[in-house]
Amino acid sequence: MNPFDGSGSPRHDEVGDSRCRWARFSSWLECVCVVTFDLELGQAIELVYPQDVKLTEKEKTSICYLSFPDSYSGCLGDTHFSFRLRQSVGRRALRFRDNVYNRDAPVTLQTEVSHFFGYVYFRQVKDISVKRGYFQKSLVLVSRLPYTHLFHSLLQIIAPEFFEKLEPCLEAVCNEIDQWPSPVPGLTLNLPVMGVVLQVRPGANIWLFDLKSQGYKKPNLVLAPTLLPTIHELDLFKCFQSVLIHLQMLWELMLLGEPVVVMAPSPTVSSETVLALVSSISPLKFCCDFRPYFTIHDSEFREYTTRTQAPANVVLGVTNPFFIKTFQSWPHVVRLGEVKMAGDLPKQMKVKKLSKLKALDTKPGNVTAHSTNCTLAHEQDESLFHLFCTCLCVQGIQRKRPSEVQSAILRRHLLELTQSFIIPLERYMASLMPLQRSVTPWKTPPQIRPFCQDEFMSTLDHTGPQLTSVLKGDWIGLYRKFFRSPNFDGWYRHRHKEMTQKLESLHLEVICDADLLGWTKDKSEVEIVDLILKLREKLVSESGQLQLQVKDGVLDRFDAFINSIIRSLPEDLQTVLSAH
């Protein structure tokens, strides 16, 4: 039975995506959900907009439970957080415009293929008119895009108004979003909503225009914008402050795709920390599963909490104390308290070996891990990193350095660490590419040489990360572990695909520059027809691959070249080939 009622799609397209009324809306959001608390049903979806969006019952149930903080969090007032849920089997592949976007977007900002992100604005306030004594409702933006900061900024604008005016407000907002241009990496876009214009540049920064106070008229740069952080980045310093001295180890765990549980006091702290951890290895894409907010009602609860097999490669953010016992056998557990933006580093923060713990230590700021999993955590390196953390935290607070600046310093440090690790891999991968002169029009493109781990290891003495990083640990051991991780598999597949497409592009260009028409002069009609069919097959195949980067006009020249060969044939063959 098809979970989408035979449509094979969550939204029925009448005459293709480009003509669908909600085509522009769906390039940003899948839908907007309103989740409320029903005394008889518990959490329940009150409204889904646009109304023609099809969510399976499993997806609806997941959204319901993930949109409310659990009862232990004690969240009063307004709370915002994020979650990530697995899409139901049977959804269609990415849309045409998603492929166009992914072609140019950084891998860390590409649309999700098999998961949805949920961005939540939850309100819980006392209300004597309600039987339970509290008004509880969540406004949820469901999207395939990892634009955490953009969508939470959007919620800050629309949610307060929505809780006052309810459905009419939501309908108006969705209609405004349906007028937005589709996201294009590197292109500045103006996104008007409720009297405010968000000026965004996917992959860059966001600016905010207030129409109500500025008298906005045209979407140009007449107004002085208020600069906000990038569309996807979080306040890293705020997220990592309580575990800052463990950050080197946490970076390594993310790089290797190790199973990690983050135990936090609220969904906000949980989701922000998990998303910050995943982003710590950027620009390398985190290819394992991660759940910024995970509950006992999650459809994958049994899958991730079973004790009959090793923990999955996943990062989970939890708030329910039930998980303290459930995950005590996991190799890596991060325990967080409430985030405080003032004061010194907590003195009790120490890395503890799990083998020496009689029970899971649940004090905030502790990270438990098997010491054998950390290859760079040598005493000398720990001292260097501890010095960096002290300078960042203590000096930053003493000098009243803004959190944004602290985060920028931290992000640069993590970027340099990741680049030191990945550049030797990129350099070796480039050496596997065939020489351009080996690409000829008379043969299929040459193959990329296979990746040889031992050969790569032999290059590290002269090109290894020790040349650019102050860390002097066991880099070779770290690479060997990385080769066994999903992150290496994802990185290698992506780079191999890019290189293959580059070879195909070069092959097309070489064919266009060759004198194939002269080659056909002494060839039989059978050989010429065979050549035409192969060239056509290549043209259809390559033009269908949106990721293929060729010089302007190459595909048009290629098509014209095929037609010129056809015109050199007898009229009867021209008629047959033109008809096909």
Image (spheres, rainbow, N blue to C red):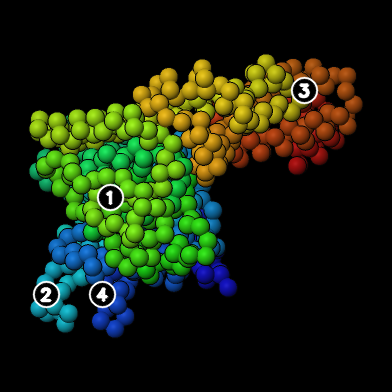
Q: Which residue is mark 2?
A: 127
Eyeballing the image, is 167 above or below 550? below
- Calculate the distance from the C-alpha at mark 4 to the C-alpha at mark 2: 13 Å
**Residue at the (48%, 65%) spot, across then down:** 307
Q: Given the image, on which type of amino acid does mark 3 rest?
A: Trp
Tag of residue 37:
4
- Calculate the distance from the C-alpha at mark 3 to the C-alpha at mark 4: 68 Å
- Calculate the distance from the C-alpha at mark 1 to the C-alpha at mark 4: 35 Å
- Calculate the distance from the C-alpha at mark 2 to the C-alpha at mark 3: 78 Å
Please report whichever mark, 4 or 2, sits nearer to the chain's N-terminal start. 4
Q: Which residue is mark 1?
A: 366
Residue 511 visible? The answer is: yes
* Callout 1 secondary element: loop
Please report whichever mark, 1 or 2, sits nearer to the chain's N-terminal start. 2
Is the Cβ of the residue at disc 4 closer than 8 Å to that at disc 2? no
**Residue at the (23%, 68%) spot, across then down:** 72
